[in-house]
Structures are given as C-alpha cells and as structure tokens.
C-alpha cells in the first residue's frame, strides 16, 4: 500500500523554516499563475518560472497553514534567491511523485516486479 502522507522538504526562507509540500492548493495556485492550465507549468518552455511559481505557492501555503501573515509573490521570491538556493530538482520531483496514481507505483516501490507485457524490461 502506498503511503499517502504528503511528502515535505524543509526550506529556510525569510528567517523561518518552511515545509514545502505539493498539495491541491499549491497546484491550484500554480495553475492560476499559468493562466488556468497546469500543463503550461510543465511543458519545459519556462522551467525557471515554473520552479519559482511552485516554490512561491508552497511557501504561501505553509505560511497560511501556520497562521503566519507573510505572503510572497513569485517576483519577490525570485529576486531574493540565487539559482543555487532553490531546490529546483527536489520541488519538481516532488510534484511528479505527487501526481503518480496508486496503480502506477512500480514494483520497485512495492518489492514486486512489473511482469505485464510491454512493461519496461519485458
């Protein structure tokens, strides 16, 4: 059985420790930032903007959850961080893992091999 708890990454920003998570509120905020189409955030045409939008949405969601008054814009977050300070690979990998349906979990995760015809390696 797949663990359905939200994955989180601790991230230091603005003097506080945030837990970055990819939940439905984050997805909705990123979708809105890209004009209503989440796929525009993922098509690879604007990878830096996508990461900053995801990070900003995650920061704002966690601040809201904690009852903190801070709210950030993507522009402000982008201005305050250098490229090496942003956990871009981790953020995008967390998004991808959050979108994998339970029935698509590989045998690697469950300890079982996928022996269906057409499965990779078969």
Image: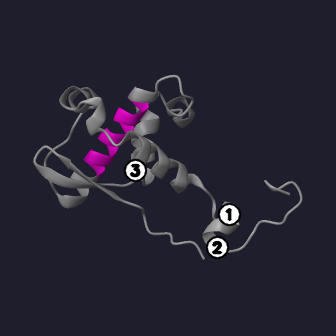
- Mark 2 touches mark 1? (CB < 8 Å): yes
Q: Residue at x 52, y 22 (%)?
A: 45
Q: Tell me the residue at 41%/61% (across/down).
A: 7
| Magenta stretch: includes residue 50 | yes
Residue 101 screen position, x and y as percent: 63, 59
Between the C-alphas of marks 1 and 3, the distance is: 27 Å
Instruction: For label 2, count other residues whose C-alpha is less than 10 Å away and answer few (under 14), some (14-19) or many (20+).
Output: few
Asked if the residue under mark 3 is in contact with the one under mark 1, i.e. CB atoms within 8 Å, the reply is no
Q: Is residue 63 left or right of residue 20?
A: left
The furthest residue to the right: 117
On the image, numbered disc 3 is attached to which residue?
25
Residue in front for this viewpoint, 68 or 122: 122
Secondary structure of the residue carrying tag 3 is helix
Give the labeled residue for mark 2: 110
Would you say 81 lies left or right of 29 here? left
Query: Which residue reaches farthest left?
Result: 15
Label 1 sits on residue: 106
Image color mode: one colour
Q: What secondary structure is found at the residue carrying circle 1?
A: loop
Magenta-colored span: 49-61
**Residue 57 occupies which quadrant of the picture?**
top left
* Disc 1 residue crowd, few under 14, some 14–19, many 20+, Cα 10 Å: few
Going from the N terminus, do you reach mark 1 or mark 3 first?
3
| Helix, strand or loop under label 2 | helix
Q: Is residue 76 magenta?
A: no
Q: Residue at x 24, y 30 (%)?
A: 82
| Mark number displayed over residue 116 | none
**Would you call the spot at circle 3 few (<14 residues within 10 Å), some (14-19), or many (20 or more)?**
some
- 1 vs 3, front mark: 1
List x then y, in percent, for residue 28: 44, 43
Q: Is residue 110 above or below residue 58?
A: below
């Amino acid at each position: 059985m797949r663990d359905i708890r939200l994955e989180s990454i601790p991230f230091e920003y603005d003097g506080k420790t945030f837990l970055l998570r990819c939940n439905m509120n984050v997805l909705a905020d990123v979708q809105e930032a890209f004009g209503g189409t989440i796929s525009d955030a993922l098509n690879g045409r604007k990878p830096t903007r996508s990461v900053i939008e995801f990070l900003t949405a995650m920061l704002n969601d966690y601040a809201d959850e904690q009852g903190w008054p801070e709210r950030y814009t993507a522009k402000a977050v982008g201005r305050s961080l250098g490229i090496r300070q942003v956990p871009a690979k981790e953020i995008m990998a967390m998004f991808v893992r959050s979108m994998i349906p339970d029935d698509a979990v590989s045998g690697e995760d469950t300890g079982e091999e996928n022996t269906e015809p057409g499965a990779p390696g078969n």
